[in-house]
Amino acid sequence: MALLEVQGIVKRFRGLVAVDNVSFTVEEGEIKGLIGPNGAGKTTLFNVITGVYKPDAGRVIFMGKDITGLKPHKVARLGIAKTHQVPKPFGELTVVENVAVSSLFGGKHRSVGEALEEARGVLETVGLGEKADLPAKVLNVQEKKRLELAKALSMKPKLLLLDEVLAGLTPREIDEMLDLLRELRRSKGITMIMIEHVMHAVMNIADRIVVLHFGRKLAEGTPGEIANNKEVITAYLGDPELALKFVRRE
Ligand SMILES: Nc1ncnc2c1ncn2[C@@H]1O[C@H](COP(=O)(O)OP(=O)(O)OP(=O)(O)O)[C@@H](O)[C@H]1O
Ligand SMILES: [Mg+2]
């Protein structure tokens, strides 16, 4: 049984079909890449999976259970956590307090004290242990991305949805984040769906990739298959001949 099944999801905003009949499955332990040009519907799809939006059609099945339309805190408690595309920590709260607030939302603790204590452990895992008692507003981009990851991890997810966690990072910071994600899969067995525009990175880490374009699923396959898919290259760059030259550096 797949860990997650997305079946025929449709999400409209007034006249705009942001997600148009998208289906795919995610196997336990998999890292699935979710790519597509700006506005393709990637974040909207995450918001449907996590219960922020109710889909106009389709179903979301998690661990064999239909979770379509459940409220976000219920989805979180079942084991799906998401990082936000634009980190918005509570700037005046400390880093550790931000993580504790998330974990309380995820419903894994009985007391604030317990949540705070465990949050320190999560911050160590993502390499932010030394920043725990600083106000979140002083963190730099890389640290804010790691805080987003810590907040999601504090909910002890089985499935982690990563929305552009590499955006704004330097090449070296990207490598460090990829190592961290691989380590999380290895040590905690966390399954991931990763929305990403940093193409070489997602090609490097994902087992399989789903491509969205104007809300529709344009392609699905291994990174090698996707990198050589003419329709995908066209969607990104407009002209297939030019795009192939670009990709192959001819
Ligand atoms: N709350 C909303 N109300 C109205 N339209 C929305 C809303 N959220 C998203 N959209 C629209 O739905 C489409 C898909 O947006 P979405 O944010 O899912 O794209 P995306 O693939 O995540 O893009 P990006 O790579 O730029 O983050 C866009 O046209 C966007 O303007
Ligand atoms: Mg987005």
Image (cartoon, grey):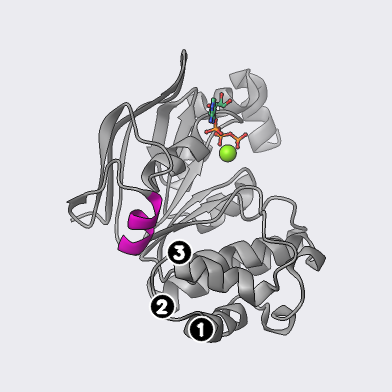
Residue under label 3: 105
Which mark is nearer the camera, 3 or 1?
Answer: 3
- Mark 2: give few (<14), some (14-19) or many (20+) Cα within 10 Å: some
Q: Residue furthest front?
A: 111
Quarter of the picture containing the N terminus is bottom left
* Percent x, y of residue 169: 74, 57
The span shown in magenta is 72-79
Which residue type carries mark 1? Glu
Residue 65 on image: x %, y %? 19, 52
Number of the front mark, 2 or 1: 2
Considering only order in the chain, which callout, 1 or 3, is on the residue closer to the N terminus?
3
Q: Which three-letter amino acid code belongs to the residue tagged 2?
A: His
How many angstroms separate mark 2 from mark 3 (CA)? 9 Å
Numbered mark located on residue 132 in the image: none
Question: For the residue with label 3, is its CB less than 8 Å from the closest atom of ligand 1?
Answer: no
User: Which quadrant holds residue 204?
Assistant: bottom right
Position above or below: 145 against 8: below
- Give me the residue at 69% from left, 50% from top: 167
Q: Which residue is mark 2?
A: 109
Q: How many labels, in total?
A: 3
